[in-house]
Amino acid sequence: MTSNEKKQLMATACKVRMGVIEGTHGAKAGHPGGSLSAAEAFTYLYFKEMNIDPKNPKWADRDRFVLSKGHTAPGLYAVLANRGFFPVEDLPTLRHIDSYLQGHPNMNMVPGVDMSTGSLGQGISAAAGMALAAKHQGKTNRVYTLLGDGEIQEGQVWEAMMFAAHYNLDNFCAIIDNNGLQIDGKVADVMSPYPIDEKLKAFGFEVAVVDGHDFEQLEAAFAKARATKGKPFGIIMQTTKGKGVSYMENQAGWHGKAPNDEEYAIAMAELKAQLAEVEAM
C-alpha cells in the first residue's frame, strides 16, 4: 500500500464516520457505536478489496458482502453512498417513513445491499450459502461477512462456521468486529466469547488477528485470506466502539442511541478536524 493510498483510505473512513453521524442524527435513532468501530473495515472492503461496480449493483460476478450485524446499517449506508451506489445527501433520511434507508439493510430497496439482515446470527449463514453456491457454479467471486462480537454469542453463528469449514469454502471470509462492548455492557461479562481466535481455528478456519483501525494490517489479512486454499478465513478486528467521536468511544451506551443536536455538532467538528489532519499529511 502506497502512502497516498493509505491517506485516501483514511480520508474515506473519516467520511464514512461523518455519514454515520449524519444518518443517526437525522433518524434520531440507530446504532452509531458499532458502525464507527467498523469504519475502516467498510472502507477497505468497498474501496480496495471487493470486485464490485456501483453502476451495476446486481452484476452477477461481483464479490458479495453480508452485514451480519445488520443494526450497523448506518456504517454500510455511509460507505455505499461514498462509493457511489446512491447519493450521500440521502444519508440523513435514515429510518424516515418514506426513505429507502431503513434501520436494517434491505436488499430489495438499497442499491449495493446483497442480503437483508438484522436478526443476529443469520447473516453469516446466508453468506456461507452464497459462497457454496459460487463454488457449485464454478465462479471465482468471494463472499465477505461482518459480525459483531456480541453477535457470536448466537449458536447459529457456529453452525455457519462449521458449515463453511466442512465445505472447504476458501472463497469465504468472516470478519468479527471485536470492540468488546454490546448493548448490555462488556461482551466478556454478558457471555464471554473468548478466546475467539482459538474457537475459529477449532472450527476449521485460518485466522488473522489485527488492529481493525490499521489499514496496513487489514491489507495483510485480506491478502492472506485470498491466498488461503481449502479453508475459510476469519479476521478478528480489535477495535474501539464509537471510534472517532470522543464521547462515544468505549461507551456501551452509544450502541443504539442517536446524537442530539449539540452532540451532533461536537461529533462533526471532531471528524472534520480528523479529515483535515489526514488531508494535510
Image: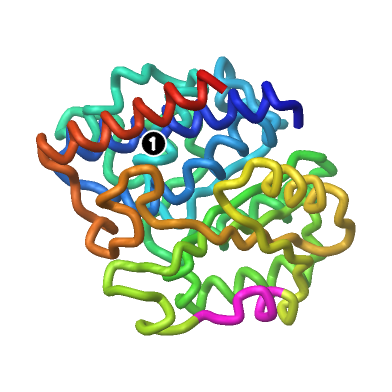
**Residue position for label 1:** 17
Q: Quadrant of residue 48?
A: top right
Quarter of the image with the N terminus in it: top right
Left or right of 245? Residue 121 is: right
- Residues drawn in magenta: 193-200
Left or right of 222? Residue 210 is: left
**Secondary structure under the numbered disc 1 in the rendered image:** helix
Q: Whole-percent x and y of residue 228?
A: 86, 56
Residue 128 seen in render? no
Q: Whole-percent x and y of residue 256?
A: 24, 56
Q: Residue at x 54, y 41 (%)?
A: 40
Work out whether 110 lies above or below 179.
above
Quarter of the image with the C terminus in it: top right
Q: Quadrant of residue 266?
A: top left
Q: Quadrant of residue 211?
A: bottom right
Tell me which amino acid carries mark 1. Arg
Question: Badge 1: few (under 14), some or many (20 or more) residues near its Cα, within 10 Å?
Answer: many
Left or right of 41? Residue 76 is: left
Q: Residue at x 48, y 21 (%)?
A: 85
Magenta segment includes 103: no
Q: Residue at x 38, y 43 (%)?
A: 244
Work out whether 115 lies above or below 167.
above
Q: Nearer the viewer, residue 206 or 262?
A: 262
Residue 157 seen in render? yes
Q: Whole-percent x and y of residue 152?
A: 50, 72
From this viewpoint, which residue is outermost toward the left? 261
Left or right of 187? Residue 12 is: right
**In this figure, which colouring scheme has been used for the structure?**
rainbow
| Prevalent SS, magenta region | helix
